[in-house]
Image (cartoon, rainbow, N blue to C red):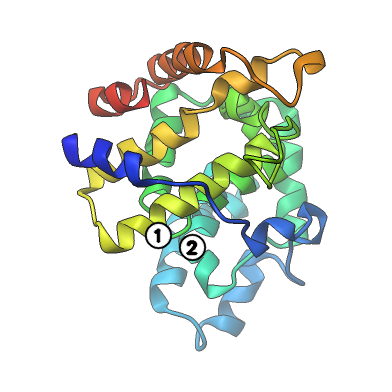
């Protein structure tokens, strides 16, 4: 825990990431994920296809896509250039709009999130959930941050949701030279998800300032950890 807390202290202001400039409506490939597999098998790592077959294909065939599983797929293979096909994204949006995600157990949500935080590009997990409308169902506190402005002097990215995604990327860069155990990595990254939750509760007339958001963030983080039944190390660092 001490090493994880020390790493948090080293995270400075995140830099603007070119990936954040890509509109959500431009994300997609020409064909669905399941139709790419024969064509791309020779070109990509076999691990990718094993992941698809084990985690996605059965659900796709039954038209019961694991929305969080697809989002985690993107977090794992984003560095290979993988994005969600338009057809798959539309089906995920339909499932999210149906309210089916409300039936997910807290343990299931945490398990998928914990795995995503161990992937090479964990921020893409949250972005993919938001692109399909699922983030509001599983992480409403985080979803509220997108579109909430911050003072541009200190946060040139302005948008609070984007700021949180950038802090994840900044932390991951530090972890390349300061590697952590898996449990510490999860705790650090999840604490960054929680660190500005209070800004989503700021009345619009006070924007872009957020006076007193710190204790509100701590309160919301505690409620979120309790809801997801997150392990104690995550709770301690998140608060």
Whichever of callouts 1 and 2 sits on the residue coming sooner in the sequence is 2
Q: Where on the picture, by quarter, is residue 132?
A: top right
Q: What element carries label 1?
A: helix
Residue at 27% x, 25% y is 231
Residue 56 on image: x %, y %: 52, 55
Give the residue at mark 1: 173
> Rounded to the nearest whole Å, what is the CA distance between mark 1 and mark 2?
27 Å
Along the line of sight, the residue nearer the viewer: 90 or 195:
195
Residue at 52% x, 74% y is 80
Along the line of sight, the residue nearer the viewer: 216 or 80:
216
Q: In this view, does 236 lie above or below 176?
A: above
Residue at 66% x, 71% y is 35
Q: Is residue 139 above or below residue 90?
A: above
Give the residue at mark 2: 52
Q: Are marks 1 and 2 in contact (CB under 8 Å)?
A: no
Q: Is residue 141 visible?
A: yes
Q: Which dot marks residue 58?
A: none
Q: Where on the picture, by quarter, is residue 174?
A: bottom left
Residue 157 on image: x %, y %: 68, 47
Along the line of sight, the residue nearer the viewer: 50 or 44:
44
Residue at 33% x, 39% y is 9
The residue lying furthest to the bottom in this view is 42
Q: Dot 1 surroundings within 10 Å: few (below 14), some, or many (20 or more)?
A: few
Q: Quadrant of the N terminus?
A: top left
Tag in front: 1 or 2: 1
Q: Is residue 66 visible?
A: no
Q: Is residue 85 above or below residue 160?
A: below
Q: What element carries label 2?
A: helix
Residue 16 on image: x %, y %: 63, 56
Q: Dot 2 surroundings within 10 Å: few (below 14), some, or many (20 or more)?
A: some
Residue 206 on image: x %, y %: 76, 16
Q: In which quarter of the image is the C terminus?
A: top left
């Amino acid at each position: 825990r001490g090493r994880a807390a020390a790493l948090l202290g080293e995270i400075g202001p995140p830099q603007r990431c070119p990936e954040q400039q890509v509109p959500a409506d431009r994300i997609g490939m020409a064909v669905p994920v399941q139709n790419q597999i024969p064509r791309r098998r020779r070109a990509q790592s076999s691990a990718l296809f094993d992941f698809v077959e084990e985690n996605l294909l059965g659900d796709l065939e039954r038209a019961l896509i694991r929305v969080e599983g697809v989002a985690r797929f993107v977090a794992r293979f984003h560095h290979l250039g993988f994005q969600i096909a338009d057809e798959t994204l539309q089906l995920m949006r339909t499932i999210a709009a149906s309210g089916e995600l409300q039936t997910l157990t807290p343990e299931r949500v945490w398990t998928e999130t914990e795995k995503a935080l161990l992937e090479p590009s964990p921020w893409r997990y949250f972005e993919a959930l938001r692109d399909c409308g699922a983030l509001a169902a599983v992480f409403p506190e985080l979803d509220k941050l997108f579109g909430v402005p911050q003072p541009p002097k200190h946060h040139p990215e302005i948008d609070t949701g984007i700021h949180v995604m950038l802090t994840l990327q900044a932390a991951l860069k530090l972890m390349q030279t300061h590697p952590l155990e898996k449990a510490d990595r999860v705790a650090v990254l999840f604490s960054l998800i929680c660190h500005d939750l209070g800004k989503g509760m700021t009345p619009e007339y006070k924007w872009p300032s957020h006076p007193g958001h710190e204790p509100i963030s701590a309160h919301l983080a505690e409620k979120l950890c309790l809801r997801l039944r997150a392990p104690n190390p995550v709770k301690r660092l998140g608060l």
